[in-house]
Image: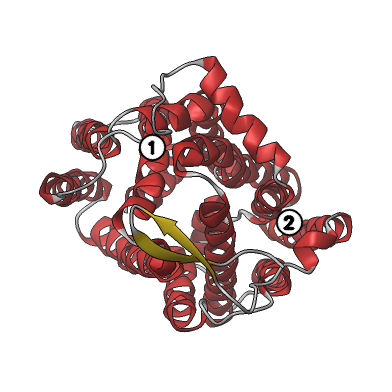
């Protein structure tokens, strides 16, 4: 809800001739903390209690949402406080995400990790479908300030869930070794990522695809000036990718364990993502635009589940936070820098050209990475799962052939 509200709010506070660039700057202020803190945040998630770390970050984001609501209710007339609070909230998210993703393998047996990731994606996408839709309705009926207020209150549910968790390992790390927050620890995670061809290539693919095809920042322009559907229509368009993602997530829960040719499926899902983005840029119909955005969400979810599964299975527990910290530069930096790129191109050549050229750029990037990484093209689950004994329990793991 908050992400949708921030873009809409910024679009209302700037002149129409500066709207595209102002929306692109939202991505820039969000990506700066990612670049600055992602490496160290991963190390922090590998050293500190991940559950307690999340309690701190979620509380901070709740406070920042409340500040946005307070400023808006007082009649905010300039965009710089929104940029500032969005940047600080992004910084809190940088420390939250490695802890959250690294916590999942500690909560389920390894043989159920693929389904756990898919189920977690379903929960996230269900919220992502309802959130922007509710944001659009709330903006139209109550005003943007109430969206921020509702967002602040919603963090209480997350905080309560974290408090109720029991039996979670308190401090990860190699047995017999004392971990610490240091540049050496951050460098260890970086070395691990770039020494693994599969992890490295999936991260690069994620960055380039989302850099070229991130058009979410331009949705207020399409809703207001091209499709003319207002705040309610904007809420539905913003939710469309998550609607497609939710459907894809349900399918992935059923089939991910049996999916053999994971590399080709991953690459073709990104091809669909780029094509749907290009058609979205050409569309002048609300229904076709909604369908294309839903396709981007569905195809992106398929690739996301596969990428996340590969990385979680091939990364030791004591390096998961560090790996996620490095990955944040790619999967968060790509969309945020992509929003800046989309806004800049749209400011010069118009929003439709920006979206269409971005979709085509995604296709070119995917073809280049596929050509440069044969292992990714041929990556598949082995026909026999390998038993792993850990803490007296028999675990199974899928690996590449």
Task: Tell me which residue sits at (62%, 64%) in the image.
Answer: 399
Mark 2 sits on what residue?
358
**CA separation in Å, label 2 and label 1:** 26 Å
In-image side of 223 versus 353 (left or right):
left
For label 2, the SS is helix
* Residue that protrudes farthest toward the front in the picture: 392
Task: Tell me which residue sits at (52%, 82%) in the image.
Answer: 287
Mark 1 sits on what residue?
93
Counting residues from the start of the chain, the first of labels 2 and 1 encountered is 1
Task: Please name whichever residue, 113 or 34, is drawn nearer the observer in this view of the structure.
Answer: 113
Task: Tell me which residue sits at (51%, 34%) in the image.
Answer: 322
Across and down, in percent, residue 243 comes to 43, 74
Label 1 neighbour load within 10 Å: few <14, some 14-19, many 20+: many
Task: Tell me which residue sits at (49%, 34%) in the image.
Answer: 30
Q: Quadrant of the N terminus?
A: bottom left
Residue 401 lies in quadrant: bottom right
Nearest to viewer (mark 2 / mark 1): 1
Q: Is residue 94 visible?
A: yes
Label 2 neighbour load within 10 Å: few <14, some 14-19, many 20+: many
């Amino acid at each position: 809800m908050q992400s949708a509200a921030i873009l809409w709010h910024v679009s209302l506070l700037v002149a129409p001739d500066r709207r595209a660039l102002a929306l692109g700057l939202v991505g820039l202020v969000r990506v700066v903390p990612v670049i600055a803190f992602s490496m160290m945040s991963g190390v922090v998630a590998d050293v500190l209690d991940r559950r307690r770390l999340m309690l701190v970050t979620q509380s901070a984001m709740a406070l920042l949402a409340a500040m946005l609501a307070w400023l808006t209710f007082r009649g905010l007339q300039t965009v710089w406080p929104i940029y500032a609070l969005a940047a600080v909230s992004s910084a809190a998210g940088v420390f939250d995400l490695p802890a959250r993703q690294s916590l999942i393998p500690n909560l389920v047996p390894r043989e159920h990790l693929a389904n756990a990731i898919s189920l977690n994606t379903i929960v996230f996408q269900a919220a992502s479908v309802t959130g922007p839709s509710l944001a659009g309705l709330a903006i139209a009926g109550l005003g943007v300030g109430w969206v921020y207020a509702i967002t602040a209150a919603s963090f209480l549910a997350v905080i309560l869930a974290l408090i109720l968790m029991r039996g979670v390992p308190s401090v990860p790390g190699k047995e017999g070794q004392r971990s610490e927050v240091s540049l050496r620890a951050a460098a260890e995670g970086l070395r691990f990522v770039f020494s693994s061809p599969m992890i490295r290539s999936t991260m690069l693919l994620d960055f380039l695809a989302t850099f070229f095809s991130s058009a979410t920042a331009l949705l207020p322009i399409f809703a207001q000036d091209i499709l003319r559907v207002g705040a309610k229509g904007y809420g539905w368009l913003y939710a469309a990718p998550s609607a497609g993602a939710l459907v894809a997530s349900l399918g992935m829960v059923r089939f991910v364990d049996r999916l053999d040719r994971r590399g080709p499926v991953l690459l073709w899902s990104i091809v669909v993502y780029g094509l749907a983005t290009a058609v979205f840029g050409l569309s002048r119909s609300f229904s076709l635009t909604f369908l294309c955005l839903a396709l981007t969400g569905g195809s992106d979810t398929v690739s996301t589940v596969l990428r996340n599964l590969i990385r979680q299975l091939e990364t030791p527990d004591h390096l998961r936070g560090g790996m996620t910290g490095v990955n944040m530069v790619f999967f968060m930096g790509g969309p945020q820098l992509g929003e800046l790129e989309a806004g800049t191109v749209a400011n010069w050549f118009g929003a439709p050209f920006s979206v269409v050229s971005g979709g085509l750029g995604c296709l070119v990037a995917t073809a280049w990475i596929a050509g440069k990484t044969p292992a990714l093209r041929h990556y598949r689950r082995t026909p026999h799962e390998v038993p792993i004994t850990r803490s007296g329990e028999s675990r199974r793991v899928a690996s590449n052939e």
